[in-house]
Image (tube, helix red, strand yellow):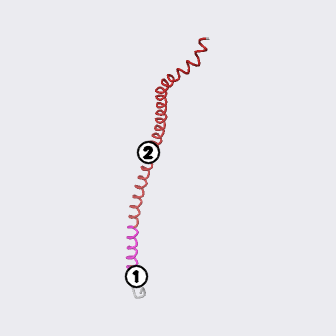
């Protein structure tokens, strides 16, 4: 096929094909730049999400520690309140026993 073409026609055809290749390369370069921009934006978003996860993790750890302390404090308050409520009545119930035990010592 190239044998029938003149030198000028052959050069024109080669230049035309090279122009088409160049045009496709330009489109690929543009597509690559857009893709690079998208990857960069995704990287930024992932970085922001990572920061948010770290902050949430810190908040959760703080909440967990505070929750444990509140539970311990509530348990202490319940034990103290139960002691205050039960101890006087228990001592009153045991008063006759104490009197029976200690009255011979006091009288003698």
- Number of callouts: 2
Compared to 8, does 40 lie above or below? above
Helix, strand or loop under label 2: helix
Front in this rendered view, residue 99 or 77: 99
Q: Are marks 1 and 2 in contact (CB under 8 Å)?
A: no
Residue at the spot 37% in from the left edge and 82% down from the top edge: 9
| Tag 1 residue | 10
Residue 51: x, y in percent? Answer: 44, 47
User: Which stretch appears magenta?
Assistant: 12-27
Q: Is residue 13 magenta?
A: yes
Compared to 90, does 48 lie above or below? below
Residue 35: x, y in percent? Answer: 40, 61
Quadrant showing the N terminus: bottom left
Q: Is residue 28 magenta?
A: no
Front in this rendered view, residue 67 or 59: 67
Prevalent SS, magenta region: helix
Compared to 27, does 51 lie above or below? above
Name the outermost residue toward the top: 108
Instruction: First in sequence, mark 1 or 2: give its number.
Output: 1
| Tag 2 residue | 56
């Amino acid at each position: 096929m190239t044998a029938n073409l003149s030198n000028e026609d052959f050069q024109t055809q080669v230049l035309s094909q090279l122009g088409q290749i160049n045009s496709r390369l330009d489109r690929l370069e543009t597509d690559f730049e857009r893709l690079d921009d998208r990857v960069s934006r995704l990287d930024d978003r992932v970085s922001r999400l990572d920061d948010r996860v770290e902050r949430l993790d810190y908040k959760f750890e703080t909440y967990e520690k505070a929750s444990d302390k509140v539970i311990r404090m509530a348990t202490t308050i319940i034990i103290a309140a139960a002691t205050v409520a039960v101890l006087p009545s228990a001592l009153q119930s045991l008063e006759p026993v104490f009197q029976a035990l200690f009255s011979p010592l006091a009288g003698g």
